[in-house]
Amino acid sequence: MGQYIIDIQNREKESVLIEFLKQIDFIKIWKKSKIDEMDLISKDIFETVKDLRNDNTTTWKNKTVSLSND
């Protein structure tokens, strides 16, 4: 299975292409909104900060990470 991201700049041509692709039985189409992408990024950031606060980290090239709340 492969996934491809196609960034279509023209809305009119986008709808024609999507309608064509919907007719092909082995292709699944879903539209991912920018809000969905931002939600995933913010979730990842939250999890990263949570891990840092709980000392669930490892060293990398002898560097230390510390958090401060200034």
Image (cartoon, helix red, strand yellow):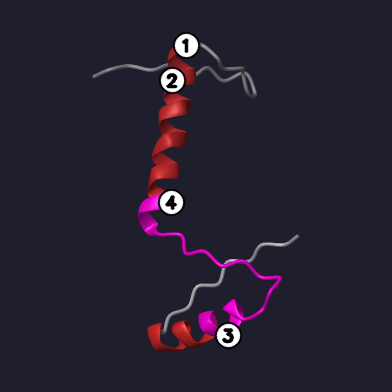
The foreground one among 68 and 42 is 42
Q: Position of residue 7 (x, y in %)?
A: 50, 73
Question: What amino acid type is highlighted by mark number 2?
Answer: Lys
Mark whose residue sits in front, 1 or 4 = 4
Examine the rendered structure and indicate whether residue 46 appears above or below residue 19.
above
Q: Which residue is mark 1?
A: 54
Question: Residue at image x 52%, y 83%?
Answer: 19
Mark in the foreground, 4 or 3: 3
First in sequence, mark 2 or 4: give its number.
4
Secondary element under disc 4, as helix, strand or loop, is: helix
Quarter of the picture containing the N terminus is bottom right
Residue picked out by circle 2 = 50
| Label 2 vs 3, first from the N-terminus | 3
In terms of image quadrants, where is residue 5?
A: bottom right
Residue 37, numbered circle:
4
43 vs 65: above or below: below
Q: CA distance from mark 1 to mark 4?
A: 26 Å
**Helix, strand or loop at mark 1:** loop
Does residue 53 sit above or below 12 in this rendering?
above
Rendering coords of residue 50 (x, y %): 43, 20
Residue at which label 3 appears: 20
Between circles 2 and 4, the one closer to the viewer is 4
Badge nearest the viewer, 3 or 1? 3
Q: Is 5 left or right of 24, judged from the image as shown?
A: left
How dense is the environment of label 1, judged by Cα within 10 Å: few (below 14), some, or many (20 and up)? Answer: few
Q: Is residue 48 left or right of residue 62?
A: left
Q: Residue furthest top?
A: 55
Sooner in the amino-acid sequence: mark 4 or mark 3: 3
**Contact, mark 1 vs mark 4 (Cβ under 8 Å):** no
Q: Amino acid at mark 4?
A: Glu
- Magenta residues, start to end: 18-36
- Compute the Cα span from label 3 to label 1: 50 Å
